[in-house]
Image (cartoon, coloured by chain):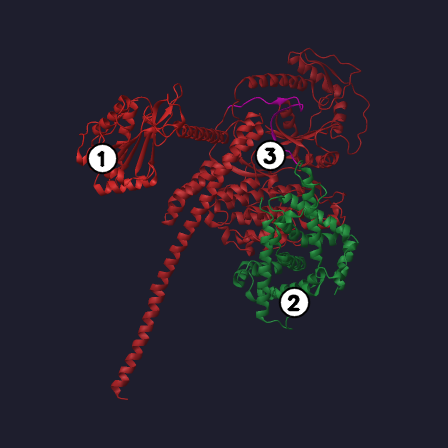
Amino acid sequence: MLNSLTTGFVNRLRANDQAAWFELWETFGPVIRAQLMKWGKGRIGPETVKDLSQETLAALSDSIDRYDPRKGARFSTWLLAIAKHVLGDEMDRRGALKRGSGKKTGEFDESWMAAARSALGADELYEAAVFRAKVEAAIRMVQKESDFTDFAIYSMRVLECKPGKDVAEALGISEPTVSRRLAKVRDVLRRRLGEVIMTYSFTQEELTEAHRNGLDLNPKITPGPDDDALFDDSISEIYHRQMELRKAQTVDF
Amino acid sequence: MSPSGIGIGILGIVGVILAVAVAVLLITHLIVPLFRGIAWVIARLFHFVIGMLADAVRMIGAILAMILFAPLVLLNIIIGRWSASAHFASSVKGELAIAGACLYRICLGHPARLVGMGGLVEGIEQRFPQAVAQAPTSDKPKGSGGRAGQFEGYKIVGSLPTGGSGSKLYIAEPDPIKRASFERAGFRGVDQVVIKNFPVDDGSNLPNIVRESRALEAAKNLGLVLDHELSPSKFYYVMRYVPGQTLNVVIQQMHAQSDPSLQGLDDRHLRSTLGYVADLVGTLQQYHSGGLWHKDVKPENIIVEQIHGAPRAHLVDFGLVTPLRSAMTLTTHGTEYFRDPELVRLALRGVKVHEVDGSKFDVYAAGAVLFAAMENSFPAHGVLSQVSRRCPEAVKWIIRRAMADYDKRYTSAAQMMADLATVQSAADPFALKPIDLPSMRSSPVEMPLPEPQAAFVGSPAAARQYAGPVPPPFAAGPSPAREPKRSRPDIRLLNWWTGEHVVVPEAPTPTPAPGGSPFGQWEQVARNAGQKVEAAVDSAFAAAGFAAGKVGADARVHRAGSHMRSAREQVEAARARIQAKREGMKARRGAWAQSKAAGRYSNKPGAGSFVSSLIVIGGILFVILMVKDKDVRVSSSSSSRQPAAAVALAPSATRDGAMETIRFASQAVGDKPAASKYSKKSKASARTEPTPVPILTSGASALFVSDFPAPLSPETRARVEAVVQQLRASGFELAGDTPDAKEGDPETINRLAEARVAVSGVEVASNEFRDRLVGWVNEKGLDAVVWLRPQLDSTGKPDVTKAPIAYVIASEQASDAVRNTARDAIASALRNAK
């Protein structure tokens, strides 16, 4: 089932909406980079990974018109396939540059990918990373939308796992205020998360990913403390994993 | 129930209550503190172990890095790339400092803290480095040398890594004339400059040149650029040189020098970091006030300079500097992680520069730099980046606020500066809460621009005294209040030596085009004042002993860089150039130029080069020794294949458990004697001089076994006798196959037979041979067996012309002295009897 938001987003991409492309880059860029880095470990450096991830988006822009979500393929899987071929082209190019390497220049060599096949894990890890990227995009949207102090409270309380008392003390406000503002941001995040998942999800299975990851987007009319705590914990865990992924790409400070 | 029963029951209840109370008291006052104490000790031990391990690994890493850098230093010296060599040498120095700090902590710091003596090392760790850093540097004589002539008025003394724009960066010294012109323009104390050159025929492309030249005028207005030249073949501009390391290197060093158990910067480095960022924000404030934004703020573009021991951060590289009111379209230039994603988004929408507040993008970058300094890593997560290392909550808040969304971050650099200054002035930054920051208490603060000050903040003491924004690094040359430019005539010099010159007559003044040459206005003034100044110039020349120049009516030469100088300046410039060339020649003839005064660029060898040389020389010696040792082994092992005419010269002994094997390396006459390999002592005995053989004080009993077939040849007999005599002289009581043994002595025959039976069927010198003989010697209560065997020729028969092989098999009870004495005695005897 293809929802209207999804259609709208793909249409924006097809219409070469720069903001949509940037949004896509911001959301999926780190995941693609991580995947390229994993495949090309020991063969390509961080700078090449950056270039290749940009080339992947360039290749995507060339073929976005051919994408048909009704065929059931996930957008993220499609993107990964493009990245795979971009990396393959790079490896071929390098092979061709090596004189006397014994490889034919026109041959598509996928032997480099065999070594990383176990790491692919039938794309489970990749799909998990894609889902985390969606959550991160939602957090970023909330950050833009929320009041600075409100989001700072949410960040300190949920992302940095500080006790409410410490947050209240640091900001000179009462604990109930902290809880109230936290709930405000949480509600917005729930809504935005739903939108982001609808935007970037193309199959029914993707739509249920949030629930599988402990993010109940449609809790009871008045969600209880347990629901909120579970939601916050899940967000915190996803955020920290995403942070690790980003940090892994920036080892050369 | 009887009253007594009730009483007993009550007593029982009271007893139970008392017991519970005592138990609670015991738990709260004894057991809990006890467990706390145990936990404290465990935590301390844990910190100690983690700290030791971390420092050990870090030290090894630093040593490895030094070993990698060292050849680069020497290689660059060899191929004459002095600047690169100095660069690598400074890296070696940095690694050496890290290794030293780690070694200190391993040997003293961590153990002292473990036993609660942290105060003992406080002085060494905090006050001592601070005092050393603040100590005045020595005044070394000024060196000379360098290239002159490439850039008029400058002598190149070094180079810097090439930038991404295809430009080349040179470090140069202005000649006295240039220096004087800088002084007149208000730039005082310019000893060294950086020339950013864009060679059109060597990598620079036109867009880069156009972009950089566009920012040039704005940069000149701020006093960032001292001089420039733009011609069809050449484009360069001149900036003040700031010696020091980039902030990213400094950050790494600070984190390396901080106690690993702290998981972040220690207090001293935290204050230094805040000082650097305050310097940066102060500079940005100055940019923004001047109507510019930097657009490429990142640690690599921040140089930390040591001014009289106080570090100070300077923002450099204004290749992307843009006027805030520019009508150009926003571009995505910048550096990832330090560039606001919102900038990219706006640029992709085609927003114009003047439609946004560019200063906010600089503020974002400043926050990112602060994050990088605290975390020792990139802010990879953008606005969601989280500081996980040791960091005051107020600083985290500043980072969060600076990197917040475009419309939520600090409205200006001044506002960020106010928050930073509050943290800096706090006695304990960790006690400061975000609510205490000025930005949280009130509406945005617009702080006035600071008065130029000589020094700033890097040191904690200065930070505490600091209560206002930081002056920008270029405050030393206050561009807004430059001295008024003097009017000078346009003079053409005819003979630089005699001073003959002509003053260009007043010509019709062309109206300067708006935005034209920056010198247009000056030229106009000069032309109008030409006649008046002529007389003054003539009189000045007369006073200087020069003939007054003849004024020509038709002379007018426009030459870039010279048409605006007075004749005196041109003469002095020419003389200075000649003098510079002479000095250059002198310097080239000399072996090494002397070091320059501290704080200035120098590519001469320093401590880093010295350490690198030591490492490389040590490495070479090690390799030589290894190769030599290998040769000795090869020689020793191949000795048995030498011809029969070879002469045995040097003993070689090997030890295999309880068995010593002494053999002579037989070498052909004329070859160098082979050295033995078993020990220093044996190496000494390898020399031809006789060496003293130790004598056993307590004596030892040994069985002497000889495998030489009877009758013995005179040569063999002499050798065997020598061995026996030497052994006896060393304190051994020998029995067995000695030349003086009684014929048919049953006891001797039995002993020899038992020994031979013990090793019958076993290959001589094998492990089993050794083990069996050791067992037999133990059983018989002897101290050792000395077994003498002839060497075998190629057919497997005994070759009595060669020196024999001796085996000493000692019992388990025998001391090392017995074994060593026997070995040395045999070696000595065989050598002397050769």
The answer to whether residue B799 is left or right of residue B330 is left
User: Mark 1: which secondary structure?
Assistant: strand
Tell which tag, 3 or 1, sits nearer the viewer.
1
Please rate how many residues cluster around mark 1, counting C-alpha atoms within 10 Å: few if below 14, some from 14 to 19, many from 20.
Answer: many
Residue named by callout 3: B476
Q: Quadrant of residue B544?
A: top right
Q: In the rendering, at what x and y percent does residue B349 appear? A: 76, 50
Residue topped by disc 2: A217
Disc number for residue B821: none
Question: How far apart are the alpha carbons under marks 2 and 3?
Answer: 59 Å
Task: Answer whether labels 3 and 1 touch (C-beta < 8 Å).
Answer: no
Does label 1 lie on the same chain as label 3?
yes
Q: Residues within 10 Å of mark 2 (few under 14, many from 20)?
A: some
Q: Amino acid at mark 3?
A: Ala
Closer to us: B386 or B442: B386
Residues in magenta, as a range: B141-163
Please state which of the two labelled residues, at mark 2 or mark 3, is closer to the viewer.
Answer: 2
Q: Nearer the viewer, residue A110 or B680?
A: A110
Residue B161 magenta: yes
Identified by mark 2, the residue type is Leu
Helix, strand or loop status at disc 2 = loop
Question: For mark 1, what is the residue?
Answer: B702
User: Exactly how many numbered labels are in the figure?
Assistant: 3
On the rendered image, what quadrant is the N terminus of chain B found in?
Answer: bottom left
Q: Main secondary structure of the magenta part?
A: loop
In the drawing, does residue B614 fall left or right of residue A60? left
